[in-house]
Amino acid sequence: MPHSQETGSEGPVTCILRLDGLQPLTDYQLFVKGIGPSGEEGNVVKVSFTTAKGPDNLYPWEERRSGPPAFADLSLITLGWHNATPPRWTEERFRSHVLYRDGDGTAHWLFDAFLCIDGWDPARNLSFSITNDRYSAVKESWEELADAWLGEDGALKELDAAIESASAELGAPPFPRYIVMGIPDPIRFQYFQDRNSSTAYWGQLGGRTLDFAEVTDQVAACQWYMDRCRERFQSLHFKHLELAGFYILSEELPLDPAFFQSAGEAYDAADTWNWKHKNWEVIVPRLSSYAHSCHEGLWWIPYHLAPGFRVWKELGFDNVFMQPNHYWDHDQVSHPLSATKNALVKYRMGMELEFEYSLVAAVMADGRSGPDGSGNPTFYAKDVPMLRERVRAYMQTYKDAGLYGVLPIALYSGTDALHQLATSTDPGDREMYHDLCQFIIGSRLKK
């Protein structure tokens, strides 16, 4: 029997249907017709979908929930201990994301949630992301990634310790700090640029070599990783952390043209580029179904106007944050904030605030350069004031869009820039740090 819930106070109304009694791994067709307030009838729309296999068991935090938890803000944590300086996350570094002390010395809880992501396996020089020009990561890479976050000496144990330390001053947090785990891309080819490279390179599950030419094997690898993360959370018995769900790593999702047509959305060549080699229109909805069957969520952060963003709800995401990418603009590249604002409002997305070490005067003072969006040296110490104004423009744009305090906020601060701001003695850095943290804790979603 279907149950429905309407959402959205502005623009088109989204009706969420829950269908009971469906069988796993079964194809279904749902015929839907909208009826207006005066009885006017719309066209019949056919929705085809395949149910996913549910989990073998639910863990205690999943049993307590009826669905994914909500949070006001999300801090992106890149792994760092493989390929950056400093070499790994510590309790001290995490403390800058956990606790904020305002100008009066009053301490506040800072971020509600943390996104665990990493782009590549440097030990093997293999990529977790379909966008990197490297060979694709194998099962052993995925296993070690899970260990880096969720091993006995993994980074999340340092985060849990940082929260425990802050609790000595603030008391226990009012709710768990939520963790969102990035899922590596199940990349079809061993070397994506070479369509003749192997599709059976990843490894085995259940004694069988997976072949990523088959979308069911791509989904199986991702579900295996999700279950591995869920099991690790249970075994580590964190005091303050709770798994909220998962994240699709690819920042663009080119899709089958038919998917856009069924959603009633326009598309162009970029929206469908190489879609036959990616299968996102199948993979994402199935991972969403699996996550939801575990009472977990699925999130995504596309780059500015990336393929797939217009149909994020139809793909099954619980929430999406768009990257404005304006921070890295220069003479040849422009990402107008007006375009970001229009997309956020129309498609009801959160914003990602974004910066890196090039924002920190105390770091840039030694003469180093900061990269643009393509990694080319572009910004120097003289550019720090301009970059600060760009970050402040992000915050003002979100307010002008009417979304601040309505939808959550994500923050990308590179490998260590938020901690660098928090520990800087430069007056401009300190002011920037306070502006950012006040923006985070000032959202009414925090209430």
Image (cartoon, rainbow, N blue to C red):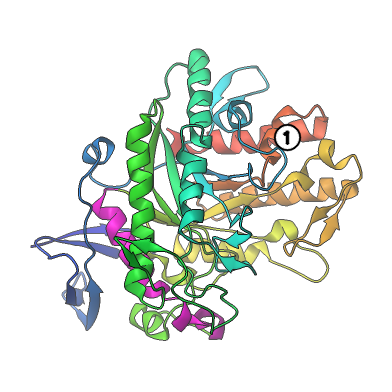
Residue type of the residue flagged with mark 1: Gln
Query: What's drawn in magenta, residue-wise?
Result: 269-295
Q: Residue at x 45, y 83 (%)?
A: 276
Q: Quadrant of residue 290?
A: bottom left
Q: Please name whichever residue, 37 or 223, is drawn nearer the observer in this view of the structure.
A: 223
Disc 1 element? helix
In the depicted structure, whether residue 306 falls above or below residue 297: below
Q: Is residue 82 left or right of residue 35?
A: right
In the depicted structure, whether residue 148 falls above or below residue 22: above
* Quadrant where the N terminus is found in the figure: bottom left
Q: Please name whichever residue, 334 or 80, is drawn nearer the observer in this view of the structure.
A: 80
Does the magenta run of residues contain 133?
no
Q: Residue at x 37, y 69 (%)?
A: 210
Taken as a whole, is the magenta stretch helix, strand or loop? helix
Q: Quadrant of residue 18?
A: bottom left
In the orientation shown, which residue stands out farthest toward the top?
Answer: 168
Residue wearing tag 1: 420
- At label 1, counting other C-alpha atoms closer than 10 Å, the crowd grade (few under 14, some 14-19, many 20 or more) is many
Q: Please name whichever residue, 288 or 53, is drawn nearer the observer in this view of the structure.
A: 53
In the orientation shown, which residue stands out farthest toward the front?
Answer: 207
| Image coordinates for residue 65, horizontal then vertical, percent | 25, 40
